[in-house]
Image: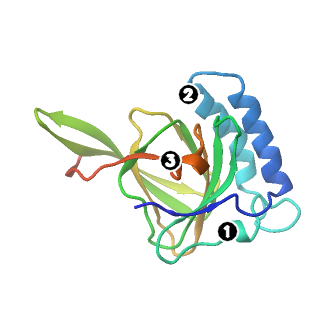
Amino acid sequence: MTPSATVGSDRLTERMTALISEIRAVVDRGLPPELTAYLVGERLAPHLLAAPDGPDALLTAAQCEGDPQRYRQHVLHAEEDGGFSVVALVWLPGQQTPIHDHVSWCVAGVHQGQESETRYRLVSEGPTARLVETEHVAGPAGTVAAFAPPGDIHLVRNSCSSTAISIHVYGADVSRLGTSIRRVYRLPADREQ
């Protein structure tokens, strides 16, 4: 399942423009993916709890619009050299991703509402494989998660009764790729014991 896309959506707020500059300064340092993701997460966190409207808003009203069919992806920025992209994901109640991993490092911060994440580990068993649930994480507004492949298999869903919005920064050009998802997993999943 691919989220609906709004590539090059609308204008950027002053706060988003400032955040993109902060991210660019980190990415341009050329650090390893895990450290880059961690430092980008530090830059994203202070912007997440900005007022949803007014002069300090992070997103425009159009960038907060959802889709009743599936979670919606608003590509806000893609660096010309493909170094990173900034995306707003808008989730209506109950919407979720498939179990998946990513093409690059990623930072996700909850801007509004709450998201739930289930993390998995891939276990090889001879010629077959299965997934094992390793952790469930509840992410209220202000929460940031940073990770880099491998080991980034998860499912994310809106776990609240209202719209959830998260800001994602990927170390790839999502406007060109269309998605940050590398692979969707359709394997049996067990709970870790």
Residue 108: x %, y % from top left: 57, 48
Asked if residue 29 is positioned above or below residue 136 in the image, the reply reads above
Q: Which residue is mark 2?
A: 33
Quarter of the figure with residue 182: top left
Q: Type of residue at label 3?
A: Ser
The residue that appears at 22% across and 36% down in the rendered structure is: 123
Going from N to C along the chain, the mark reached first, 2 or 3, is 2
Q: CA distance from mark 1 to mark 3?
A: 19 Å
Instruction: Specify the label residue 180 is tagged with.
Output: 3
Residue 66: x %, y % from top left: 59, 72
Q: Nearer the viewer, mark 1 or mark 3?
A: 3
Q: Type of residue at label 1?
A: Cys
Asked if residue 103 is positioned above or below residue 166 in the image, the reply reads above
Going from N to C along the chain, the mark reached first, 2 or 1, is 2
Instruction: Specify the label residue 150 is tagged with.
Output: none
Q: Which residue is mark 1?
A: 64
Give the SS element for disc 3.
loop
Q: Type of residue at label 2?
A: Pro
- Mark 2 residue crowding within 10 angstroms, few (<14) / some (14–19) / many (20+): some
Q: Decide if residue 193 is in sight here.
A: no
